[in-house]
Image (spheres, helix red, strand yellow):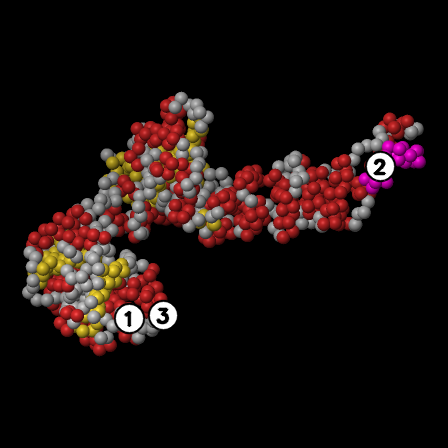
Amino acid sequence: MEVILSHEHMDFDALASMAAASALYPDAVMVLSGRQSEQVKQYLAIYRDHFPFIPEEDAPWDHINHIIVTDTPSLERTPAAFLKDRDIPVTVFDHHALSEEEKRRYTTYYLDNTGACITILLEEWMKQEWVPSESEVTLFALGLYTDTGSFSYPGTTLRDLKAGVFLMEHGLDLELVQQFSEDTLSSRQQEVFRGYLASCEHIGGQGLDVITSMMETKHYAGSLNVITSRLMETTGADAVVTVTAMKNKVFIIGRSASTRLSLLPVMQHFGGGGHERAASASVKDGNPTDILQMVKHLLGQSISSPVTAEAIMSAPVKTITEDVRVDEAKKRLIYYGHNGFPVVDTNDELIGIISRRDIDKAVQHHLGHAPIKGYMSTDCVTVSKTASFEEIQNIFIRHNIGRVPVMDNGMIVGIVSRTDVIEQLQQSTDEPHERVNVKTQMETLLSPDVVQLLKMIGETAAAEKMNAFIIGGMVRDILLGQKGEDIDIVVEGDGISLAEKTAHRFEGTADVHETFGTATVTLPSGRRVDFTTSRTEYYETPAALPTVSRSNIKEDLYRRDFTMNAMAASLHPSHFGDLIDYFHGREDMKKKTLRVLHNLSFVEDPTRILRGIRFEQRFQFHMSKETTAFIHYSASAVSSLSRTRIIAEFQSLLKEADPVQSLARLDELGVLHAFFPGAVWTRQTKDVLKGYLDSPEQPKDLPEWFCILFCLYLTNPDTVKAAEAAAFTKKQKSVVQSTSFLLSLLNEKEWNSLGRFHSCVSRVSDEALFFAAIAADKKQAGFLLQYREKRSKLKPLLNGHDLKAAGLAPGPDFRDYLFSLEQKMLDEEITTRDEALHYIRQHE
């Protein structure tokens, strides 16, 4: 016989999972544990007859050949614990972790990472397209909502939400769910709660407030997990563990609100289980005092090291002096994108804080001319480098401030802002991610001499108390498994100084650019290494060249174009190869997504649009939906670009990308006309461009970028004229004008005589004839190509001496006679010298 069981002190998830599992095993008997939570008892008092549950004392224990366990991975926590040493097959459905060592023989496990166990079983219901009854919907929802905290607990997954949608689609009554899931404490539970409060002990440690509480009671009190959660809410502690001696058992319940404290190892020591933030165990005939001491010891081992101010602060710090005018301070806030500044005196000692709010108020009252001294806060709240993240977070809340300077030996070494706190909070709620190190890939893909060079640069920087990183394209290519040895180094510190030390060490030369904080080192082997001091950029106007100032690696990466180019790898000896990826570039690369770093990126530098198209084709990526939207709204900024910058970036695009795809993409993004006014992308211009690209007779004396671009203007004579705006040289403008003239000529009438046509176009260049031919219709193109070919092979049959010998007097008419001969030759009316002489004699 088959039985379906769950753990002692059954909650709604356990009960609901049993009921849902019964559909998978229709011949199995559902056995209720003798102890249930108060809420489950209240529910069963009304709905017990809707489900064929039997009490554990009535279970057919002597005839069991298969056990199905839900909401716990351990048979020991069920009424069938006494069967654990028998070879009875067991099937487990649970959402709690279990190591391979903990798994027992003859057991099939269905373990998954969901917020509630019922979700795992409901997914099978959805797959089988089973329809739950009204009572089943309510029970399943109670299990789902209570174990996920109505989808608010950190362990809640998308799968839980989908399970909720399934129940809503089948008539879920939320009012009924709320009625039974309310955590109202009974009088006995309130007594236990007060006992917990009275015996609270703050053990603390590494920035966390951890409470333990112990009590003994002769009377049974259910829902200890609910009471423990209530204790954590009431005290505001980061974690609470209660130890309760009740009859012959000691119950250990833990709840944690911090990712730094995992309760699972604590409970596993006592044979229990659960999640990192919610776990429990029970010990039969245990000594509660001894258990409490062991809990304290294990908790100390389970707390991970705190994130400190030094780890999340921004450095170097942008400061301001008290004599700076309010309007100048506001300009600097906009310049750096900050919301406030520490104020320092002439010795760089902290004397105040000025916020954007303070500055805005002063400006509003027309005090822009006044020094900030009168409006800054002088009661500065600061922290040390070792202050924990939790301490910093509490400081922000307690003092209602937006930034806190980090001090070391009386000097400002960094600053933590609201943005830093938010980013850390986001990281703590994200899925745990492993530290990524690309040292192995570097050693595999880069030549040994390059790897050695990078290590020595990192060592030199560390010795000078600087941090050096490889950045951008090299890091991107390493992650893509490609070789790329263009070395760009960004330095937190003095990039020029590090470049000069590197050049001296390797007997190379350093070409220094003091204004930009950059230097290029050329080694004896000819290899070049570019060094840049980490910097931030500010664009005074859209499309202007940026103004730069010294900053840190994060701000330096933030000024890049796309997330895949905004990664760095550390060269520091202690963590060589560690990936720096603030903007999730690696994740975007896995998704083959090209994502811009910030909303105004294309406004600040519209040439990034052309770069984006180049990267799309090079890596077979595609711009994100949001990125393409930013392009659409940035089109007007393109007009601020110089033609030189546009053409330079366009040339880079054409060097590695397919011209047809690139121009089609520009048109798709709606910015083709912005970059090249008057250009059009139609089926006709696409065919014209393909005609140029496929032609073996492409013009040799014109740059390729101009030829490709010119093809987009060859729709008609009027659009051709617009191409003059794209022409740089006199020759290019001449080709544009001549092509326009040719197309107009062809449109005026049908030409049958090459000679007569020659009289109109003899001075037109071969390049203009070529472009007119690929733009004209088939018949006209054939005529133009015939003319071009014959003209190119045209050799004079007579010269001036022949005309004089024929009796003609030298003069301007000579040119007319010779030109007339060319016309006759093009029409093949004259093909030999004798025919030419005869023609001249007839017209002398």
Q: Residues within 10 Å of mark 2 (few under 14, many from 20)?
A: some
Nearer to me, 446 or 173: 446
Q: Residue at x 25, y 60 (%)?
A: 108
Contact (Cβ within 8 Å) of mark 2 with mark 3: no
434 w.r.t. 164: above or below = above
In this picture, residue 525 sits left or right of residue 13: right
Q: In the rendered image, which quarter is residue 444 located in?
A: top left
Specify the label residue 23 is tagged with: 1
Tell me: 643 left or right of 344: right
- Element under disc 3: loop
Separation of residues labelled 2 and 3 (CA atoms): 89 Å
Q: Position of residue 109 (x, y in %)?
A: 25, 59
Q: Secondary structure at mark 2?
A: loop
Magenta stretch containing residue 829, yes or no? yes
Which residue is denoted by mark 3 in the rendering? 129
Within 10 Å of disc 3 (Cα), the crowding (few <14, some 14-19, many 20+) is few
- The residue that disc 2 covers is 831
Q: Are marks 1 and 2 in contact (CB under 8 Å)?
A: no
The residue sitting at 23% across, 75% down in the picture is 51
Q: Earlier in the sequence, mark 1 or mark 2?
A: 1
Q: Position of residue 459 (x, y in %)?
A: 32, 29
On-image quarter of the N terminus: bottom left
Residue under the point 76% across and 41% down? 787
Q: Position of residue 338 (x, y in %)?
A: 37, 44
Q: Amino acid at mark 1?
A: Ala
Q: Amino acid at mark 3?
A: Glu
Q: Please provide percent x and percent y for residue 777.
A: 71, 50
- What stretch of residues is rendered in magenta? 826-844
Dot 3 or dot 1, earlier in sequence: 1
Name the quadrant containing residue 412.
top left
- Of the numbered discs 2 and 3, the one sitting upstream in the chain is 3
Q: Is residue 116 left or right of residue 38?
A: right
